[in-house]
């Protein structure tokens, strides 16, 4: 139901620094992972894991823009297993590597 999707989204936004899984969120909502997965996909037109990735990467962009952290530190802060996996997810979501994102203004003359 829409209520569970809303609650799942709120949970993701409050816990984005953790390693989040569909099962964790379903457990919190006391519903089955399958039900959450189906409901979420039909309301949001994306999977729970894609949504989690998008939320984490939005925060990653802010952390990169702050210029205070190295890529592996950002990966750690956002609950990614390692910097390699973080970079893979970042590229999937944004179309560029964290490094290219970091230096995008210097690469783009416009």
Image (tube, rainbow, N blue to C red):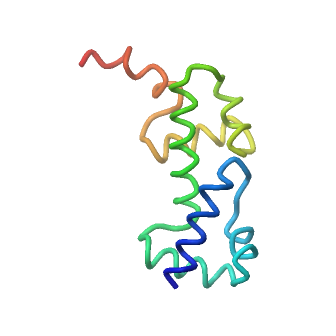
For the C terminus, the quadrant is top left
Quadrant of residue 106 within the rendered picture = top left
Closer to us: 40 or 8: 8
Identity of the residue drawn at 75% across and 44% down: 81
Pick whichever, 40 or 11, lies toward us: 11
**Figure check: 5 above or below 86:** below
Tell me how many marks there are: 0
Residue 18 in the image: x percent, y percent? 73, 51
Tell me: 73 left or right of 48. Answer: right
Q: Is residue 19 above or below residue 8?
A: above
Give the residue at x 58% y 57%. Answer: 52
Establish if 98 lies above or below 78: above
Q: Position of residue 4 (x, y in %)?
A: 58, 79
List x then y, in percent, for residue 3: 53, 80
Q: Residue at x 53, y 59 (%)?
A: 50
Q: Vertical placement of 23 versus 10: above or below?
A: below
């Amino acid at each position: 139901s829409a209520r569970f999707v809303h609650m799942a989204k709120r949970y993701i936004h409050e816990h984005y620094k953790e390693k989040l899984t569909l099962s964790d969120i379903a457990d919190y909502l006391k519903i089955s992972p399958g039900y959450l997965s189906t409901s979420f996909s039909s309301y949001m037109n994306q999977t729970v894991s894609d949504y989690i990735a998008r939320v984490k990467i939005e925060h990653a962009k802010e952390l990169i823009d702050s210029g205070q952290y190295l890529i592996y530190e950002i990966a750690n802060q956002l609950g990614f297993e390692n910097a390699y996996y973080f970079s893979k997810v970042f590229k999937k979501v944004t179309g560029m590597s964290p490094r290219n994102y970091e230096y995008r203004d210097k690469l783009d003359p416009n």
